[in-house]
Amino acid sequence: MRRRTFILALSGMAAATRLHADAQQQVFDLFTRIAAALSDDNPMMFLESVDQDMPHFQDFQNDLLALTGQAQLSNSIEAVSEEGDEAHRTEALDWFLEIVGKSESRPVERRRAVVNFRLERRGKRWKIVSIDPLHFFAPPQPK
């Protein structure tokens, strides 16, 4: 009986580890798709992944749409830290963003920052519930 309990406990730990790894991979895949969509001039993929009840969502949406309307973007992301479980995740991404204006002068701006995200699983999908700093995705300011 003791051996069976031990085996059941091990298989339960393996299942929990697999769920954690699956959640981690799903969130990484989400951010990979977001970065690719921004590079393809498709901000809607990002916006659809953000909870509209997130504080300052409307400002974020306006900034992101203005940014993609004014510029072509190239994105590179790398995970700095990640923690959480199958329902809640916190991710810190080293995000490099190259912004090339769509105007004739085609000004270039490069940004790099650690952007922190909090996510929650909603059904089968992950939703971003917090982004810090939000202004990382704002359009360039005139000089």
Image: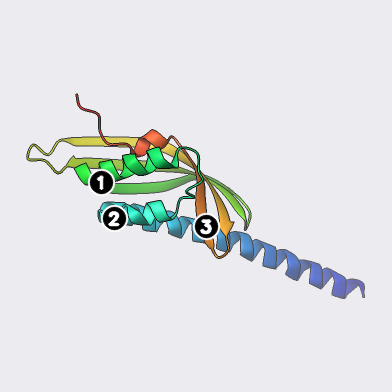
Pointer 3 or 2: first along the chain: 2
The residue positioned farthest toward the left in the image shown: 104
Q: Which mark is residue 96?
A: none
Label located before the other in sequence (2 or 1): 2
Q: Image point 36% across, 57% down: which residue?
A: 45
Q: Name the residue under label 2.
A: 42
Residue 122 is left or right of residue 136, and the answer is: right
Task: Kindly identify the amino acid type of the residue bearing the numbered disc 3.
Answer: Trp
Neighbor class of circle 1 (other Cα within 10 Å; few <14, some 14-19, many 20+) is: many
Between the residue at mark 1 and the residue at mark 3, the CA separation in whole angstroms equals 23 Å
Does 84 sit above or below residue 21? Answer: above
Q: Where is residue 25 in the image (x, y as percent from the top left)?
A: 51, 60
Figure quadrant of the N terminus: bottom right
Q: Distance between the residues labelled 3 and 2?
A: 19 Å
Q: Which residue is drawn at 38% across and 58% down?
A: 33
Circles 2 and 1, Cβ within 8 Å, touching? The answer is yes
Q: Looking at this view, is 25 or 11 the one in front?
A: 25
Q: Quadrant of the C terminus?
A: top left
Mark 1: secondary structure: helix
Q: Does residue 112 sit above or below 39 in this rendering?
A: above
Disc 2 residue type (three-letter): Asn
Query: Tag 1: residue type?
Result: Thr
Residue 122: in sight, yes or no? yes
| Labels 1 and 3 touching (C-beta < 8 A) | no
Residue linked to disc 1: 68
Residue located beneath label 3 in the image: 126
- When asked about the image quadrant of residue 7, the answer is bottom right
Mark 2 Cα shell of 10 Å, populated few (<14), some (14-19), many (≥20): some
Residue name at image x 86 percent, y 75 percent = 4
Q: Is 133 placed above or below 11 here?
A: above
Which residue: 44% across, 57% down?
A: 30
